[in-house]
Image (tube, rainbow, N blue to C red):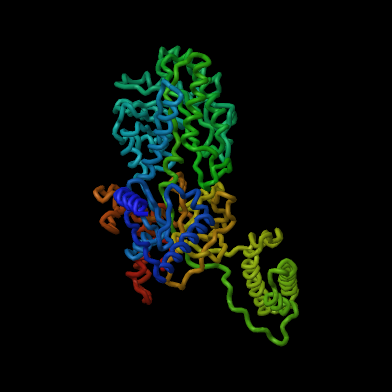
Amino acid sequence: MAQTSEVDTDTQVKSEPATAAAAPEAAPPPPPEPTASESEAKRAAQSHALAVDASFKRYGIDRWGRDFLRSNDQGHLVFTAPNCPVVDLHVLSLELARRGIRTPYVVRFPTMIERQMETLKSAFAKAISDNNYQGSHIGVYPLKVNQRRSVVDTVVKARERLNYGLEAGSKPELLLALAQPPLKQSLLICNGYKDREFMRMAFHAAELGHHVIIVLESTREVRRYLDVFNEQDWIARPEVGVRAKLYSRGSGRWQSSGGESSKFGLTTNEILAVARELAAANLHGQLSLLHFHIGSQITQIKRIKTAVREGARIYADLQEHCPQLRYLDLGGGIGVDYDGSRTSYPSSANYTLDEYASQVVFEVTEACAEVNARQPTLLTESGRVVVANHAVTIADLREVQGELLPVPEATEDEHRLVDELRETLENINTKNVDEYFHDAIDFRDECLQLFSRGYLSLAERAAAEGLFHRIRAKVEKIVETLSHPSEEITDFLGKAQQKYLVNFSIFQSIPDAWSIDQVFPAAPLSRHAEKPTLQAQIVDITCDSDGCVETFAHPDENLSYLPLHVMNGPDERYYLGFFMTGAYQDSLANVHNLFGRCHEVILRNPDDDMVLPGSERVELSPTLTFEIKMGATCEDTLSAMDFDVDRINKWLRDRHLAVETTLGESWAMGLLQSYPYLSR
């Protein structure tokens, strides 16, 4: 026993060091249980996140705005432009209002333009590397897409770093391009129809150091080019290109601008005739570029592939006739995904910039290899995809048309149909909603017929309308709880929408929504943690029935209404943003009802100078600096219509000499310098 005990003791003694070495460190104490307030805060944060997530899906922001929009703790939309501090769009609007700058205005984020230029350049660099392509790529910005100085200056500033060119299609645009610093590695492409003066301007641009290529649109233009070429002993001469009229067409809203019936371009027979005419003048070496364009906002990548293959084959074979041919200009047309669906829908595109570049480089590589032609330098003239998402148009919402007003109490002699509507409102529920709502529609329609025949009073008609609107609102809430509501009810609810008055002009701010039914994404700038209770169309403040936005971009299916909130009292500032309005809208805007150019609010680096004439600097924080260009006043819009404002001033003063008014002459005179949109 003693021996056993001794062995046990010895074993224990020997084991102690090993046991001590292997013993884990003392476990840290468990974290304290969260307090009731901490648990409540966590639940609130989770609830907020879920509500915002649902709101982003409701408007499609999670898809079309995924690259530049977020939400903050207040449920406000936050714009995240590259290399810039984030901007709370709602807070920005409140601060501008505090400073007396009213909606509508366009907020611009220039670094979004730079990022798109960089993305396009990188996409082609990768495609060129992946395909062992021997040529290069040059991006060209077409000035027609947006000629605002803040936009053009941004492109020009990044031009040298990103090897970007400019495209001009008119004399004013060519003058604008002429005024920019000449860069030999950058191109100046001249498109559009050209007279002799336009040709001389292009020759002058070449003498100033620009690398100019005149794209010939007709056989007559080659004769004008030759005439101007020979009329002076020019120090420098522009090269020429020819625009091919392909049989291939684009897809989407502008597909008719391509194909054999397109407005611009030369047939292959005409291209060869141009080449022969240049050769006869011993100038065949001047032809350096082949251009084609199959339309704007091309939605399908397969249409691009087909067109590029056709254009590349023309280029490859044309090299035999034109030894200096070295540029293949693919034109514009890269689609913008306005609705976030990434489909071939007219407001989207079923490809990315990487996929576009990859397909283009591959098709050109294959076409050139088939006939052993030199691979060209590729040019793209896509402006929409570069500038569309840099701008947000912001306006404030004012009032709901068709609000539910109190319905008078029932009277003893009330018409039977009005009484039926009261009972329907009281008793409709999830089990009888189909039957009762159908009855309510019949009761309402019969009331309107009886009123027209003189059997129903105006007060009874008003009661019937008010009751029916309440029934409809109740049915909307019931339908939200149903897994499979009837198609008849959902169709009816989708048509009978309220209207929200917004302080802007569609014709000035988003003219494409009126002229070609272009859809833009839209969303309120605040209250994304709250569920909206209205389904509204947007009406502007013009005296025009077309001033109504009835379709809004969404990735699943474009919305025929926009979910919006009821304002929390008359003092609430409730703002709406239309996004991706940076392409064409500034150029196509018109002054219907004399609602002129809106204010322009541009995010700047705090160290940047203000560059727009008459602009001012507004510093919202040490890191947030904006340049603000005030919009057109009443005087500006009247002057634009050829009125003599000095004479109007005199007339107003003369009227006040003989009449004493409540507000006085100075108030009336001040209106000329006021902003024509609604004030508070």
In x, y percent, where is residue 426?
68, 77
Q: Is residue 155 above or below residue 407?
A: above
Q: Who's the residue at 51% across and 29% down the image?
A: 359
488 with respect to 565 (left or right) = right
Q: Who's the residue at 43% across and 57% down the image?
A: 71
Quarter of the image for residue 583 reads top left
In x, y percent, where is residue 44?
45, 66
Judging depth in this view, the residue of 48 and 193 nearest the camera is 48
| The residue positioned farthest toward the bottom in the image shown | 412
In x, y percent, where is residue 1?
37, 54
The quadrant of the rendering that contains the C terminus is: bottom left
Quarter of the image for residue 414 reads bottom right
Q: Does residue 672 appear anywhere in the picture?
A: no
305 with respect to 586 (left or right) = right
493 with respect to 97 (left or right) = right
Judging depth in this view, the residue of 294 and 172 nearest the camera is 294
